[in-house]
Image (tube, rainbow, N blue to C red):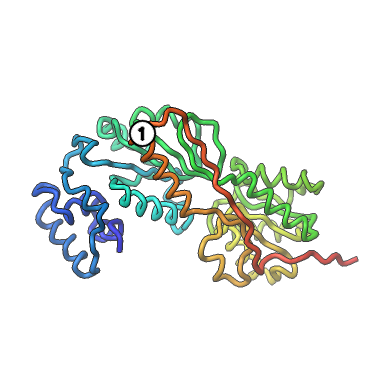
Amino acid sequence: MTLKDIAEQVGVSISTVSRVINKSGTKVASNEVKQKIWKVVRESGYVPNEAARMLQNCTDTDTEDDEVCKKIYVMVLRSLDEVEGDTFFTQIIDSIENTIYKKGYVIERIFQRNDLNSTIFENNSECYKNRYLITIGRFEPALLDHLNFYFSKIICVSLNDLDINCDQVFCNGYLASQTAINYLAKLGHEKIAFIGEEKEGRYRGYIQGLENNKLHIFPNYIVKDAIISMNGGKNAMKRILMNTCELPTAVFCSNDRTAIGALRACKDQNVNVPKDISIIGINDIEATQFVDPMLTTVRVPLNEMGKVAVNTLVDNIEHGHTLAQKIALPFNLIKRESCKKYERID
């Protein structure tokens, strides 16, 4: 049980839960809310950690001194539909949360992408002055000026190496995609399909991987407008299976969720994986080990991305490094059952 879990059950912010538990004042919440929080605490057996106790001097106002209550905001740069059920985001957020509390800070609020244009975000700009932000997901460089108006220090976490003037922690999806294609090419696959989004570095990595291995690009094997979800992967795979006279021998999916959806589509169409088609994804979410066949993937260090992001942001807050930090974390290929050597039938 974490502060986040308690906050979700009661329907309040994580900072409110923290202040109530650490008895940071009488005005932190109504008596009714306090009673609900303590009920969940008692039932779960939650024990506050030392980092949470460091927040005991905070008050419940939005204008409190940031030297007393250190607030960090998190913004997920995806729509609610895309984020729901995607452990890429939840795993990074959990890692961020755990590291933040160990550092003596608190997550004040988790934003969604659509909050950028909400009246709540626009009308409370003063609440964000001298506050700190971690973004997760596809960061558009044009967004930085807008966010700089609200936040004094920003770090972004993503799968793209970006040309932006702020701290960033990333695992290079462009290079990870080339690793996936190189592996399939090594197995003898020459007709490799793609399921994902055109604007992602993973698509560019797929194209570059084909070119590096001198493989032909088959447009009818490419679905670059897929919804990045299990259902999106399933629908995209069905399009490939139904609209091609000759099937690809392998499919590269831009993340594991689309790959799991593609596995389902193959099963529905009586296409055997990996005998007929090999499938590979990216991220190595937990579910990859529980599907049949188990999914070959490129592992992204999600927990480390969250940890390093918080440590870098806190270093900036407390020591004020002047040069934007660009930290690239490694990826590695995880070989499982969904890929096999291509056996040419003449």
In the image, residue 270 lies at what x, y percent? Answer: 69, 72
**Which residue is located at x 66 percent, y 69 percent?**
337
Q: Residue furthest front?
A: 319
**Which residue is located at x 43 percent, y 38 percent?**
155
In the image, residue 111 lies at what x, y percent? Answer: 36, 44
Could you tell me which quadrant the N terminus lies in?
Answer: bottom left
- Amino acid residing under circle 1: His
**Which residue is located at x 41 percent, y 31 percent?**
321
Q: Is residue 137 left or right of residue 132?
A: right
Of residues 35 and 2, the one nearer the viewer is 2
Of residues 179 and 234, the one nearer the viewer is 179
Q: Is residue 312 left or right of residue 256?
A: left
* Location of residue 9 with respect to 168 vertically, above or below: below
* Location of residue 36 with respect to 137 vertically, above or below: below
Q: Identify residue for label 1.
A: 319
**Which residue is located at x 11 percent, y 52 percent?**
30
Q: How many discs appear?
A: 1
* Location of residue 312 with respect to 96 vertically, above or below: above
Q: Secondary structure at mark 1?
A: helix
User: In the picture, residue 59 is in which quadrant?
Assistant: top left
In the image, residue 231 lies at what x, y percent? Answer: 54, 59
